[in-house]
Image (cartoon, rainbow, N blue to C red):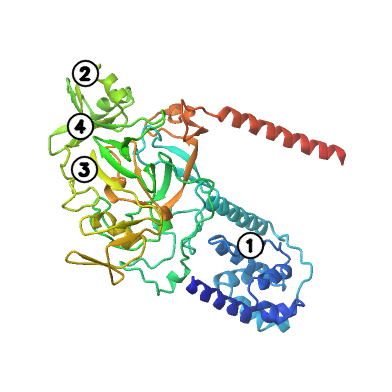
């Protein structure tokens, strides 16, 4: 925060030396260009813009969109309306104003300037910029659209579901990466280039000039806390690795939290829980986790056919008729073919005359999978038998030793920023010998409903609360990539809620009715105004 404060003060001095004569030219005092916040308030009066725009200057990302607008409005307030002037002020990052400031004797301030653009293109650009500002504000602090890219939550959320993710349920997170393109995530579509400016070498270079524009993690108050079995959108904690299938390294490069890959999983364990996976099922504090009746868990089944199919597509089409949609996979170790299915789907498929058998695949207890967290030799865990493991809660203190350190090392170093060194059986945190650790934030355990086809907390570990993006609340559109024609649209899923119990209910009809009423009302209103005139 001290670095941000220094940067803020520097910006105020730059603003003063670039504009103080223009303030005088507009009938104000030169010192008014120096006082923080107050100078922006006065500037809005000078350029004849709403005073509430000052508030926008303090909203990360949005302030970057607003700055060019204010630069252009400032020079136009002193008669500089040409296209060349506009391009100069934008491409000089506002420093063209400094040139005008020291040549202010040649300028004339336009009192009560007409802020409506003189040309159609100007009005179009103004409208687009305002639309971008509004959309960015809504996208960042209220609702963000999100697409389901993988089948890890099948059959709860399907590939091709388009969601509205609420930012305000758990509290909107203030953007940490402030120099970035609005309304895109970590890359620019088509160009496949970074959408943000940051020094992302292996070690975080806090002294880098670029990194001064990173702000600390902050979050607005939320309406509720994350509850067990909530579906949550979050940033992938391990998105600092070169190989996302190898979770052993602590870090290969640095990436800002809010620019890590977005994922959506089910929160099966909250802060303070002790979680264990037994035979693929989650137990919380020793009791089997209760799921809503909408949740349909999928597991892996070895499949054998009685006939030889002419093509892979023929076999998968047969399985799709039983709602087995993940396709057929091959296990090179055993030579078996396997599918992902719910128990209900597997029981129905066994009745098909072309299917010889469907056998549930399970790992044996204590059969260690080296890909599974915490990637330590003394933990013989796998996807079906895991834990027990304590999920850290903010403010709680635990005893640590070299036996349990693999569970919490990444948490202490990567997520909470401490230096940790092990010498023999002694643990040093920030140079101090310690046997306890107190957690700084809450952590959660995220898993997919498609239990054997999901990269989740079983692979990378805990999800810190500062990585949480929001809560999916609504499916506004659903596109079946395997469908044909009109069947590509899943009409029954459109305008349905994500959570809840019972069968999904589509509110599409209500939405269409409301849209018709709104359209008719607007037409009636316009005719009435025309008649009154």
> CA gap, disc 1 to disc 2?
67 Å
Residue at the disc numbered 1: 55
> CA gap, disc 4 to disc 1?
57 Å
Rendered view: 466 above or below 84? above
Q: Is mark 4 on a helix, strand or loop?
A: loop
**Camera-nearest label, 2 or 3:** 3
**Camera-nearest label, 1 or 3:** 3
Mark 2 or mark 4: name the one nearer the start of the chain: 2
Residue at the disc numbered 2: 354
Mark 3 or mark 4: name the one nearer the start of the chain: 4
> CA gap, disc 1 to disc 3?
51 Å
Rendered view: 423 above or below 478? below
Mark 2 or mark 3: name the one nearer the start of the chain: 2
Left or right of residue 228: residue 283: left
Q: What element carries label 2?
A: loop
> At which x and y percent is residue 208?
40, 74
Left or right of residue 20: residue 255: left
Task: Write down the quadrant of residue 74 in the picture.
Answer: bottom right
Residue at the disc numbered 4: 361
Q: CB atoms at circles 1 and 2 under 8 Å apart?
A: no
> CA gap, disc 2 to disc 4?
20 Å
Mark 4 or mark 1: name the one nearer the start of the chain: 1
Residue at the disc numbered 3: 382
């Amino acid at each position: 925060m001290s670095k941000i404060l220094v940067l803020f003060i520097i910006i105020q001095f730059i603003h003063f030396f670039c504009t103080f004569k223009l303030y005088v030219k507009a009938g104000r005092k030169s010192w008014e260009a120096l006082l923080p916040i107050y100078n922006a308030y006065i500037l809005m009066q000078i350029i004849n813009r709403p005073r509430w725009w000052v508030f926008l200057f303090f909203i990360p990302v949005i302030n970057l969109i607003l700055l060019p607008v204010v630069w252009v409005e400032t020079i136009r307030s002193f008669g500089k309306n040409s296209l060349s002037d506009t391009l100069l002020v934008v491409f000089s990052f506002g420093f063209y104003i400094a040139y005008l400031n020291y040549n202010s004797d040649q300028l004339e301030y336009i009192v009560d300037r007409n802020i409506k653009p003189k040309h159609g293109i100007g009005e179009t650009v103004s409208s687009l910029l305002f639309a971008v500002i509004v959309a960015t504000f809504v996208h960042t602090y209220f609702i963000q659209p999100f697409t389901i890219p993988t089948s890890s939550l099948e059959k709860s959320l399907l590939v091709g579901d388009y969601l509205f993710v609420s930012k305000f349920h758990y509290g909107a997170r203030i953007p940490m990466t402030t120099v970035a393109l609005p309304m895109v995530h970590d890359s620019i579509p088509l160009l496949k280039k970074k959408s943000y400016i940051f020094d992302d070498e292996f070690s975080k270079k806090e002294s880098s000039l670029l990194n001064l524009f990173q702000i600390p993690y902050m979050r607005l108050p939320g309406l509720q806390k994350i509850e067990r079995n909530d579906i949550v959108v979050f940033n992938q904690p391990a998105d600092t690795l070169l190989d996302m299938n190898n979770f052993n390294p602590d870090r290969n490069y640095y990436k800002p939290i809010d620019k890590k890959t977005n994922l959506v999983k089910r929160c099966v364990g909250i802060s303070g829980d002790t979680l264990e996976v037994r035979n693929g099922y989650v137990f919380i504090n020793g009791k089997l986790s209760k799921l809503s009746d909408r949740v349909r868990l999928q597991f892996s089944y070895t499949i054998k056919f009685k006939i030889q199919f002419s093509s892979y597509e023929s076999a998968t089409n047969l399985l799709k008729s039983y709602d087995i949609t993940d396709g057929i996979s091959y296990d090179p170790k055993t030579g078996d073919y396997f599918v992902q299915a719910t128990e209900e789907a597997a029981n129905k498929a066994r009745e098909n005359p072309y299917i010889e058998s469907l056998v549930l695949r399970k790992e044996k207890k204590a059969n260690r999978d080296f890909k599974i967290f915490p990637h330590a030799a003394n933990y013989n865990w796998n996807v079906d038998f895991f834990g027990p493991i304590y999920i850290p809660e903010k403010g709680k203190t635990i005893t640590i030793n070299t036996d349990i350190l693999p569970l919490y090392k990444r948490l202490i170093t990567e997520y909470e920023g401490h230096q940790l060194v092990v010498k023999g059986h002694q643990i040093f945190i920030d140079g101090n010998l310690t046997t306890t650790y107190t957690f700084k934030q809450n952590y959660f355990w995220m898993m997919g409903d498609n239990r054997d086809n999901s990269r989740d907390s079983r692979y990378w570990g805990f999800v810190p609360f500062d990585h949480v993006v929001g809560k999916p609340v609504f499916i506004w559109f659903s596109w079946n990539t395997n469908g044909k024609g009109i069947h590509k649209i899943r009409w029954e899923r459109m305008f349905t809620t994500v959570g809840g119990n019972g069968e999904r209910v589509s509110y599409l009809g209500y939405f269409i009715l409301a849209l018709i009423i709104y359209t008719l009302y607007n037409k009636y209103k316009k005719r009435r105004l025309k008649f009154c005139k």
